[in-house]
């Protein structure tokens, strides 16, 4: 078992081509890949879960948002815990927690129990997600970090792409519960390799107490607003529960901002948003990923219920999105380095929006080649055009000492955008109750949802056009210790910590 302690990035001095370096990569890829796989697998399984648990759309929304909520609210706290208590230690705790919660999800007898266990699963993901890249950053020699991070990114993309296929295959075996049970053996292998091969590391500059208050307020704010938006169409917007939760969520959001302004060591330094470029980049992130969150929540269900696809067929139908992202994201990043990010961040969301409008043709008897594939391909091309310069812009707009925080914030904004879209978009499109299991009702609402999502992309394009500026080529290049990676398409994007 490796027990050497690494106090600063790169002190371990591992090389990517060495046996020790390869085992570190295997450990981090397995853990992060498990969380990525889980996200895409669950989306494919939602219609089957709903039928088996005899539940309406509202609880299924919570199956998705419960996980995203705790992951989003606790992500920065999870990174801070790793910096202070040991990145390998917190990573292992996160993987074990994730596995136990996954097992509980698999045994869940009711929709409400499944929601509760998904919330717990999100806590585990918040502990392990920041640790995977932080371990690479701390373990490898500086010259080997770009290659190691690139390898991690590539395999993470493979996990993302495999999710729909794996989910469809597991469902074909007869039960959606295998979607969660598959995490248990993966977690066991990950823990074994991590304990044997990954060196421990901490951040010796981490000081001050953990911002527990900020994390709690962030959780309460997201919970209150999400609950109100999901339950409003079900219980009525004048329901005391709905009104009370919305007000509590908004009050917690205000309290979070005030607390972070006063906190000596805040979870989220608000001065990072003083940069117009950074704020605009995160505004685009929120709008584009809100649209993406909505389509990835509704499209697999529409393909199965409206077009008559099997779960496996619906997974294959969406496969071009991560596949195109894998092939083109690197090239898109290099292009933005030459021409600047503004053009791609303006045109990319428009291409995504056109793709979403084409997907409104998903109805009963739709042809995949004629009615589905064109929209999916344009969605993929638009995302490949947008996300690499988007992430790089958010990173480069922040001060160098906030590089890790800038990436974490950008990832969190993407998650929150998707979370709120899943909460709002179905009701705004008329998809409530059991309508998602009726082809005609779902097809009508799905078309509306895609049109609304296309509008969000248009708004993102406008924000880019007005708010993003290309860097002055006479300025010296800014070097970050962390190398930004494209946010992966609608999945759990990598979070980089310093």
Image: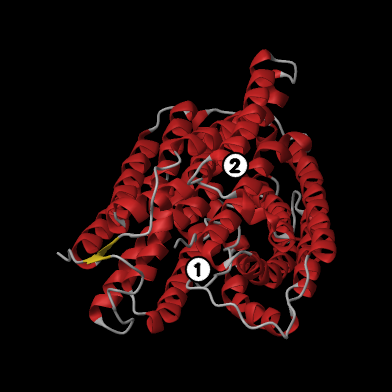
**SS at badge 2:** helix
Q: Nearer the viewer, mark 1 or mark 2?
A: 2
Q: Position of residue 403 (x, y in %)?
A: 54, 65
User: In the visual, does 451 lie left or right of 17?
Assistant: right
Residue located beneath label 2 in the image: 261
Please tell me which residue is depicted at 17% across the width and 66% down the height of the picture: 2
Please tell me which residue is depicted at 31% across the width and 71% down the height of the picture: 139
Q: Residues within 10 Å of mark 2 (few under 14, many from 20)?
A: some
Residue located beneath label 1 in the image: 157
Q: State which tag comes first along the sequence, 1 or 2.
A: 1
Q: CA distance from mark 1 to mark 2?
A: 37 Å
Please tell me which residue is depicted at 48% across the width and 62% down the height of the picture: 496
Q: Position of residue 336 (x, y in %)?
A: 70, 79
Of residues 302 and 330, the one drawn nearer to the viewer in this rendering: 330
Q: Quadrant of the N terminus?
A: bottom left
Please tell me which residue is depicted at 29% across the width and 74% down the height of the picture: 11
Is residue 360 at all visible to an observer of this figure? yes
**SS at badge 1:** helix
Q: Quadrant of the C terminus?
A: bottom left
Of residues 423 and 483, the one drawn nearer to the viewer in this rendering: 483
From what the image shows, is residue 467 above or below residue 73? below
Is residue 182 at all visible to an observer of this figure? no
Q: Position of residue 20 (x, y in %)?
A: 24, 76
Quarter of image, res 350: bottom right
């Amino acid at each position: 078992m490796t027990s050497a302690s690494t106090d600063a990035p790169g002190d371990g001095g591992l090389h990517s081509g060495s046996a020790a370096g390869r085992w570190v990569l295997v450990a981090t890829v397995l853990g992060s890949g498990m969380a990525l796989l889980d996200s895409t697998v669950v989306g494919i399984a939602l219609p089957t879960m709903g039928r088996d648990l005899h539940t309406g759309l509202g609880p299924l929304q919570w199956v998705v948002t419960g996980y995203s909520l705790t992951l989003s609210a606790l992500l920065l706290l999870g990174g801070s815990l790793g910096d202070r208590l040991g990145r390998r230690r917190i990573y292992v705790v996160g993987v074990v927690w994730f596995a136990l919660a996954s097992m509980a999800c698999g045994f869940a007898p009711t929709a409400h129990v499944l929601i509760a266990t998904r919330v717990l699963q999100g806590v585990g993901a918040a502990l392990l997600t920041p640790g995977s890249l932080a371990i690479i950053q701390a373990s490898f020699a500086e010259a080997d970090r770009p290659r190691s991070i690139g390898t991690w990114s590539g395999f993470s993309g493979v996990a993302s792409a495999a999710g729909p296929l794996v989910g469809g295959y597991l469902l074909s075996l007869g039960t959606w519960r295998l979607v969660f049970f598959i995490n248990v053996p993966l977690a066991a292998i990950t823990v074994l390799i991590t304990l044997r091969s990954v060196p421990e590391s901490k951040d010796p500059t981490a000081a001050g107490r953990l911002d527990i208050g900020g994390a709690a307020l962030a959780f309460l704010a997201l919970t209150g607003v999400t609950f109100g938006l999901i339950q409003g169409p079900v219980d009525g917007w004048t329901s005391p529960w709905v009104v009370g939760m919305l007000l509590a969520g908004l009050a917690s959001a205000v309290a979070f901002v005030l607390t972070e302004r006063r906190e000596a060591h805040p979870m989220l330094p608000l001065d990072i948003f003083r940069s117009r470029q950074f704020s605009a980049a995160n505004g685009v992130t929120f709008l584009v990923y809100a649209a993406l969150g909505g389509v990835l929540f509704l499209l697999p269900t529409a393909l199965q219920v409206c077009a008559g696809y099997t779960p496996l067929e619906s997974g294959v139908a969406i496969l071009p999105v991560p596949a195109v992202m894998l092939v083109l994201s690197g090239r898109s990043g290099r292009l933005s380095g030459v021409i600047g990010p503004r053009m791609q961040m303006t045109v990319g969301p428009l291409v995504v929006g056109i793709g979403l409008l084409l997907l409104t043709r998903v109805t009963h008897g739709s042809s995949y080649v004629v009615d589905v594939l064109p929209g999916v391909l344009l969605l993929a091309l638009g995302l490949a055009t947008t996300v690499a310069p988007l992430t790089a812009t958010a990173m480069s707009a922040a001060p160098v000492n906030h590089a890790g925080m800038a990436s974490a914030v950008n990832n969190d904004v993407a998650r929150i955008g998707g979370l709120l879209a899943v909460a709002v978009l179905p009701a705004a499109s008329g998809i409530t109750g059991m309508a998602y299991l009726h082809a005609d009702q779902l097809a009508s609402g799905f078309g509306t949802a895609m049109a609304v999502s296309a509008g969000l992309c248009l708004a993102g394009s406008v924000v880019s056009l007005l708010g993003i500026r290309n860097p002055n080529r006479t300025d010296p290049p800014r070097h970050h210790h962390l190398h930004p990676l494209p946010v992966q398409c609608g999945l759990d994007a990598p979070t980089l910590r310093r």
